[in-house]
Image (cartoon, helix red, strand yellow):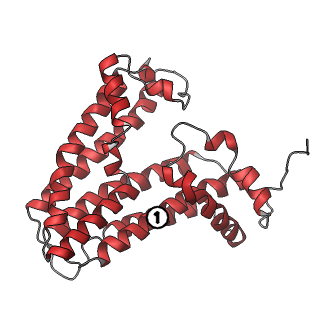
Amino acid sequence: MSAPLTHDPAEDHPSLEQLRAVAQPLDHMARYNAEHWSGALYMRFLSIRVTRWLLPTGISPNGVTWLMIAVGVLGAFALPMPGLVGPVVVVLAMQLQILLDCSDGEVARWRQRFSPAGIYLDRVGHYLTEGAIPIALGLRADGYTLSAPLDVGGWTVLGLLVAVVVLVNKAFTDLVHVARAKTGRPMLDDVAATARSHVSGLAAVRRALGYLPVFRAFIAVEASLLALVAGVVDVTRGDLLGSQVLLAVLVPLAVITAGGHLLGVLTSSRLD
């Protein structure tokens, strides 16, 4: 067996093989909640190359995270742009956001620079982006354009409602860690068993939803793709029905997703 690869954390010109061994370790990539499906499919293949390009610039891991936040939020609020321009910009922005989301951790692992601030900023980025998309969808459904004065209508209010539920749902996950920390319990192992409900009926529903994962409608990449489909309908019809129907569907789905998540947390071993 060959000797393990080593590196100098200050070295900013590694080979792809050296960088991958440190920045994409198998134990990290195999975690239960570690990867969005795009990571395993294509994004990690791209991100390691972007990380290799970023290292000589001297940018810090948190600097990459700030870029990720800016791309996500600004990209989300491009959605009201007319025609297909807005939806296409949003899709591209969410792809770039997840690319930078991969790279910030890779830069941190290569440089061995880890901090609570980095984790905090990463969570802030996802909260802001995934809250901004339904708001922007509501603005689009109301016919708002970036060049017009803001006039909040009923669809925008629905978008704000979905955004609030999305943020509350995300908080349900983070509050598990808060509750465990405040009671002196250790961090949870990132494995499927900890998320499994003790109530057989809920566990069966959760398994069934694995075949129709409606919760993914509120994750940035999937939300952007849905907005693009709705935008195609808008352009084909010459109105905003596609965006309006999508938003109307997201309202009950958001409530169901958040309610199911809360029940799942309370009936699993995550709070034991």
What amino acid is labelled 1 in the image?
Gln
Residue beneath the point at 32% across and 50% down: 218
Image side of residue 103 versus residue 144, left or right: right
Vertical comparison of 114 with 187: above or below: below
Q: How many marks?
A: 1
Is residue 139 found left or right of 21 in the rendered image? left
Q: Is residue 152 left or right of residue 23?
A: left
**Which residue is more in the foreground, 80 or 175?**
80
Asked where in the image residue 260 lies, by quadrant, the reply is top left
| Left or right of 249, for residue 208 | right
Looking at the rendering, in which quadrant would you find the N terminus? top right
Placement of 232 over or under 208, stated as above or below: below
Mark 1 burial class by Cα count in 10 Å: few <14, some 14-19, many 20+: some
Taking the spot 25% from the left edge, 52% from the top edge, the residue there is 163
Q: Quadrant of residue 154?
A: bottom left
Residue with the most extreme right position: 2
**Residue 243, quarter of picture:** bottom left
Q: Residue at x 78, y 58 (%)?
A: 17
Question: Does the rendering let one see residue 87?
Answer: yes
What residue is shown at x 12% (from left), y 68% (from top)? 142
Where's residue 125, x and y in %?
Answer: 43, 56
Q: Quadrant of the C terminus?
A: top left
Helix, strand or loop at label 1? It is helix
Q: Which residue is mark 1?
A: 95
Percent position of residue 234, x then y: 19, 71
